[in-house]
């Protein structure tokens, strides 16, 4: 399947709540494949997740990526990709974390967003089977960010403080 063009602001599809997926037909399978292909090819910045509206499709589907160090080669970072259809956060920790986010649909803009440190997710996988899992840390942040996309919410509406340019972000990160 082709790598899709990422939709960017001010496209209205990014601000519109998505429609629930009820059929796991060929169109749904093509959407899933397009999301996976597109997020896997996203570099500079690398894609940590991608929601259907970001490729112009107003359906309740997203992909989130859980990154981890390869235990056989500590210099290599691998990922496990979760396909989430009609995802829902069924519980969230009261403990939150403030961290910097960016978005493929809002290029070169970053900012601090407060998110729950842990979330429990219920969704359907690419086969239409129900899955539930607990996400914490960076994965929890990505899941919440992508589910916001499915609800027509952009991270910039949740900023704590002002947005940062890419240059300002690089300066902030160089201090760590």
Image: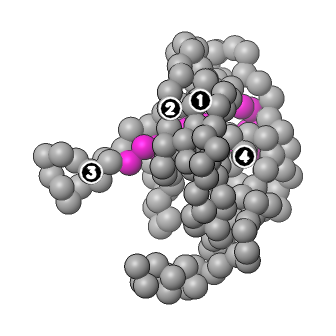
Q: Looking at the rendering, which quadrant does residue 162 occupy?
A: bottom right
Quarter of the rendering occupied by the C terminus: bottom left
Residues at discs 4 and 1 in contact (Cβ within 8 Å) = no
Looking at the image, which is closer to me, 115 or 101? Answer: 115
Label 2 and label 3: CA atoms lie apart by 20 Å
Q: Position of residue 157 (x, y in %)?
A: 80, 61
Mark 3 surroundings: few (<14), some (14-19) or many (≥20) residues within 10 A: few
- Which callout, 2 or 3, points at the residue further toward the start of the chain? 3
Would you name the residue on which mark 3 appears? 69
- Give the SS element for disc 2: strand
- Which callout, 4 or 2, points at the residue further toward the start of the chain? 2
Can I make out residue 145 in this image? Answer: yes
- Which callout, 1 or 2, points at the residue further toward the start of the chain? 1
User: Which marked residue is nearer to the observer: mark 3 or mark 1?
Assistant: 1
Looking at the image, which is closer to me, 90 or 130? Answer: 90
**Magenta range:** 55-67
The single residue placed furthest to the front in the displayed view is 94
User: Which marked residue is nearer to the observer: mark 4 or mark 3?
Assistant: 3
Would you name the residue on which mark 4 appears? 149
């Amino acid at each position: 399947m082709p790598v899709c063009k990422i939709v960017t602001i001010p496209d209205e599809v990014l601000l519109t709540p998505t429609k629930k997926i009820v059929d796991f037909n060929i169109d749904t399978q093509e959407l899933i494949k397009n999301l996976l292909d597109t997020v896997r090819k996203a570099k500079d910045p690398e894609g940590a997740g991608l929601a259907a509206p970001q490729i112009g499709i107003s359906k309740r589907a997203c992909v989130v990526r859980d990154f981890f160090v390869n235990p056989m080669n500590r210099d290599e970072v691998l990922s496990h990709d979760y396909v989430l259809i009609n995802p829902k956060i069924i519980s969230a920790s009261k403990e939150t974390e403030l961290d910097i986010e960016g978005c493929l649909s809002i290029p070169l803009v970053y900012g601090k967003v407060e998110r729950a440190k842990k979330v429990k997710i219920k969704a359907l996988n690419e086969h239409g089977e129900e899955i539930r899992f607990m996400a914490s840390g960076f994965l929890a942040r990505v899941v919440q960010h992508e589910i916001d996309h499915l609800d027509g919410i952009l991270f910039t509406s949740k900023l704590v403080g002002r947005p940062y340019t890419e240059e300002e972000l690089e300066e902030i990160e160089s201090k760590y």
